[in-house]
Image (cartoon, rainbow, N blue to C red):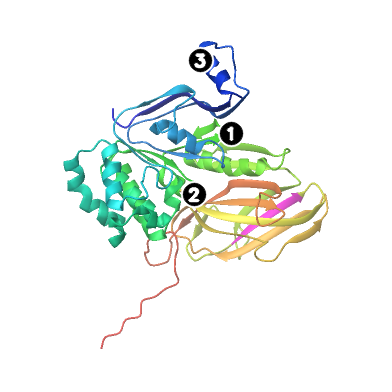
């Protein structure tokens, strides 16, 4: 079926031979090895099924861009193979393949021709490419006069002017204004809904959660994890902090309702309990009502002397989107010189203005406004609760506004 991608034991290394004669001799004498060899990717294997949207995440230098170049054939692999079925559209490095002395229109003709489309097809589609790019008169100016955002507009317009079987998108979409980013994502979502396979590389975890059915985590050229978006994204966030602290561990488990709990930390401070209670009665709540006065109550146990202690919260909806978050660093309530053996109690009263649905609370104990410095304890989705609308007028969305219509007739 079209849109399938199969990658088997894919690898790419860059070699330094020391001399040209040594490199040529290696063609005939296999025992002659390079002086140095650096593997950017090694033993990477995965598949994408027709209509599946797969995200690729990883830190800089993990091998993401190299992987896409190998898939699209702009770089040759050292080992392994890539099997592609169907027509591929790719947006890789900004302006890749564009001649700076050609106009946007000329580059569009050239790029679409390289993708295998006929002159007649390109002629028929060119007005749509020009309209979608929205660069005005610059479309007939040399692309060396373009900003990076304008280059991205034309490149994306050409790559998506014809419906592909597989769409590959690199970080290029992070360039430019928010208007065109939203416009581009609308087209990507449309392709996904129409059954186009998508391979998407980004640092935006929100986009990954929204767009992708599956996520692959690359680390130092290897596939470290391949799974559902929440599983891989939460693991990746924990992994970044774990790399800064050799004592840190990362654990994951999924509850019966599908929520994934990811726990990481070095353990100098740990979360002993986290409850959602009624602010008036103190009764523990599994279900809150819209407009109810509630309170998050957390107890932290200190297991080593800590110069600074910061508590952070994130509330997420069922899709994993953060609807609210803050920490005691930003509220200027940092606890200082906390001694081993102490217990610290945090209470956060608030009015539940969330819309009906299921929500989770992620909590963290650290020393600053980020868990990358000292991650004592970070637990994704530790507390799960539901919100129902019991006595408010009907409304839609994830938040209730204390708003009333005021109507007058003249």
Pinpoint residue 397: horizontal percent, then vertical percent: 40, 60
- The secondary structure that dominates the magenta segment is strand
Earlier sequence position, callout 1 versus callout 2: 2
Q: Pointer 3: what residue?
A: 27
Could you give the CA–CA distance between mark 1 and mark 3, rounded to whole angstroms?
29 Å
Number of numbered discs visible in the structure rendering: 3
Mark pair 2, 3: CA separation: 43 Å
In this figure, which residue is indicated by the disc labeled 1? 220
* Left or right: 22 as drawn, with respect to 143: right
Residue 343 percent coordinates (x, y):
77, 53
Residue 69 position in % (x across, y down): 43, 35
Q: Which mark is residue 99?
A: none
Residue hosting label 2: 204
Q: Which residues are magenta?
A: 295-301
Label 1 element class: loop
Q: Position of residue 75 (x, y in %)?
A: 44, 31
Q: Quadrant of residue 332?
A: bottom right
Q: Is residue 370 magenta?
A: no
Front residue of this view, candidates 107 and 396 = 107
Secondary structure type for disc 2: loop
């Amino acid at each position: 079926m079209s849109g399938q991608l199969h990658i088997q034991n894919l690898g790419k290394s860059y070699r330094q031979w020391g001399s040209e004669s040594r490199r040529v001799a290696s063609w005939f004498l296999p025992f002659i090895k390079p002086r140095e060899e650096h593997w950017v990717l090694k033993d990477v294997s995965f598949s994408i099924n027709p209509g599946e949207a797969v995200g690729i995440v990883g830190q800089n230098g993990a091998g993401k861009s190299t992987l896409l170049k190998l898939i699209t054939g702009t770089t040759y692999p050292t080992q392994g193979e890539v099997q592609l079925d169907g027509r591929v559209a790719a947006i890789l490095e900004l302006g890749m393949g564009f001649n700076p002395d050609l106009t946007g229109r000329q580059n569009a003709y050239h790029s679409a021709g390289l993708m295998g489309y006929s002159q007649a097809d390109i002629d028929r589609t060119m007005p749509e490419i020009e309209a979608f790019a929205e660069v005005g008169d610059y479309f007939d100016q040399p692309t060396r006069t373009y900003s990076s955002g304008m280059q991205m507009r034309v490149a994306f317009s050409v790559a998506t002017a014809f419906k592909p079987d597989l769409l590959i998108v690199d970080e290029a979409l992070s360039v430019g204004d928010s208007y065109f980013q939203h416009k581009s994502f609308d087209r990507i979502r449309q392709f996904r809904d129409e059954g186009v396979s998508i391979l998407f590389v980004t640092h935006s975890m929100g986009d990954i959660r929204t767009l992708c059915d599956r996520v692959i985590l690359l680390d130092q050229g290897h596939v470290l994890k391949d799974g559902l978006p929440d599983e891989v994204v939460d693991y990746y966030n924990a992994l970044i902090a774990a790399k800064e602290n050799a004592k840190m561990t990362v654990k994951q488990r999924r509850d019966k309702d599908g929520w994934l709990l990811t726990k990481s930390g070095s353990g100098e401070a740990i979360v002993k309990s986290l409850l959602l209670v009624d602010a008036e009665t103190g009764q523990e709540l599994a279900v809150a009502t819209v407009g109810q006065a509630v309170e998050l109550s957390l107890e932290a146990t200190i297991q080593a002397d800590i110069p600074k202690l910061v508590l952070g919260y994130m509330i997420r909806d069922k899709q994993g989107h953060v609807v609210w978050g803050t920490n005691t660093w930003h509220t200027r309530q940092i606890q200082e010189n906390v001694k081993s053996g102490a217990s610290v109690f945090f209470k956060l009263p608030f009015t539940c203005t969330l819309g009906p649905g299921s929500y989770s609370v992620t909590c963290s104990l650290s020393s600053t406004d980020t868990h990358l410095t000292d991650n004592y304890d970070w637990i994704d989705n530790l507390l799960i609760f539901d919100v129902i609308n019991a006595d408010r007028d009907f409304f839609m969305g994830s938040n209730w506004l204390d708003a009333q219509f005021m109507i007058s007739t003249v």
